[in-house]
């Protein structure tokens, strides 16, 4: 995916930010950090670059002006469409030769792994 993304000028981490915002809508920097499971300082650096490039905007939260809410700009739409297409290409390459049944089994198994890891993470919290 990184090779496919290189010509677009976007990084995989930026794609993850855009995907999270696409799924959940406007998010705080803290929420993004938790969603992506990375340090807040990492998210700040990624957002700084994305804001510089005009892909996201930071706005004060109405209930807490110290908290910054992140939202995408209209400039993201053409880039997001490219990202979706590239993701589909990579998925097709990665799953070539798998039957539908095998793909369903794989998704189920990976889902169970994620549930196990989430449970451990919650126990550690």
Image: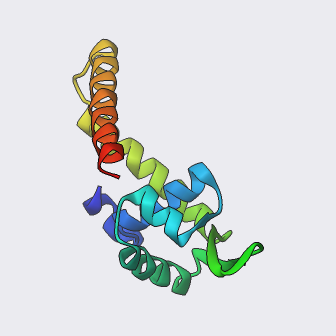
Q: Is residue 84 left or right of residue 123?
A: right
Between 31 and 51, which is closer to the camera in this rendering? 31
From this view, report whether residue 33 is shown above or below residue 123: below
Between 24 and 67, which is closer to the camera in this rendering? 67
Determine which quarter of the picture holds residue 97.
Answer: top left
x and y, in percent, of residue 22 in the image: 59, 54
From this view, report whether residue 26 is shown above or below residue 22: below
Say which residue appears at 44% left-offset and 66% top-offset.
33
Q: Residue lying at the far right in this picture: please name it.
A: 62
Say which residue appears at 34% left-offset and 16% top-offset.
100
Q: Quadrant of the N terminus?
A: bottom left
Between 106 and 98, which is closer to the camera in this rendering? 106
Q: Residue lying at the far bottom in this picture: please name it.
A: 52
x and y, in percent, of residue 28 in the image: 58, 68
Q: Residue lying at the far left in this picture: please name it.
A: 97
What colouring method underlies this structural image? rainbow
From this view, report whether residue 72 is shown above or below residue 120: below
Q: Is residue 48 left or right of residue 70?
A: left
Say which residue appears at 33% left-offset and 26% top-offset.
107
Say which residue appears at 27% left-offset and 24% top-offset.
109
What is the count of numbered marks? 0
Q: Is residue 16 visible?
A: no
Determine which quarter of the picture holds residue 120.
Answer: top left
Determine which quarter of the picture holds residue 69.
Answer: bottom right
From this view, report whether residue 93 is shown above or below residue 3: above
Q: Is residue 104 visible?
A: yes
x and y, in percent, of residue 70 in the image: 61, 71
x and y, in percent, of residue 38 in the image: 34, 65
């Amino acid at each position: 995916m990184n090779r496919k993304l290189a010509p677009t000028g976007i990084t995989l981490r930026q794609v993850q930010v855009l995907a999270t915002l696409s799924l959940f809508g406007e998010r705080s920097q803290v929420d993004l950090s938790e969603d992506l499971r990375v340090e807040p300082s990492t998210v700040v650096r990624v957002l700084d670059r994305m804001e510089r490039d005009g892909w996201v905007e930071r706005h004060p939260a109405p209930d807490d002006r110290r908290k910054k809410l992140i939202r995408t700009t209209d400039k993201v739409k053409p880039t997001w469409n490219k990202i979706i297409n590239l993701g589909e290409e990579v998925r097709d390459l990665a799953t070539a030769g798998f039957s539908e049944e095998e793909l369903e089994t794989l998704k189920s198994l990976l889902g169970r792994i994620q549930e196990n890891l989430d449970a451990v993470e919650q126990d550690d919290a």
